[in-house]
Amino acid sequence: MKIGKLDMHCGECRIIDYCCHGNATGYAICTDSRFKDVDEEVYSKIADRATFEPFQHCEKHETLECDDDRESDGCDSWSDYKAKQIADFVANKLKEIAE
């Protein structure tokens, strides 16, 4: 199914492991316009590779090893931050494929 059609039906998709589902303020892949026409399976295959790529660190903490305290000082929670990093990785890979 195309990600744009998932419409926040959290847990009913193949990409829930890459999403901050269950958190009303967290990042949700299906609301990201970059992926509205991308199939869940394609996203999942690319996102699986993201776990082997280095993520950008939080500029405030200069590390990836942040915890939920990040939210209190202006950073996203670790799960939300990681989901966004994976989404950016997928978006960049999709762009490379399209070129």
Image: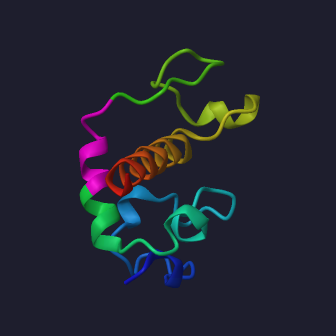
Does the magenta portion include 90?
no
Give the residue displayed 48% in from the left and 27% down from the top.
56
Instruction: Please indicate whether residue 63 sits to the left or right of residue 93 in the image.
Output: right
Q: Which residue is pictured at 75% across the width and 28% down the height?
A: 73
**Span highlighted in magenta in the image:** 46-53
Residue 44 horizontal/vertical position (percent): 30, 62
The percent position of residue 52, horizontal first and vertical second, equals 24, 35
Q: Main secondary structure of the magenta part?
A: helix
Q: Is residue 32 visible?
A: no
Residue at the (52%, 73%) spot, across then down:
36
Q: What is the residue that sits farthest to the top in this orientation?
A: 62
Q: How is the image coloured?
A: rainbow
Q: Residue at x 52, y 47 (%)?
A: 84
Q: How many marks?
A: 0
Position of 69 compared to 67: left or right? right
Q: How far from the left and from the top, in percent, is residue 83?
A: 48, 49
Which quadrant of the figure has residue 14? bottom left
Q: Give whichever of 14, 21 is nearer the camera.
A: 14
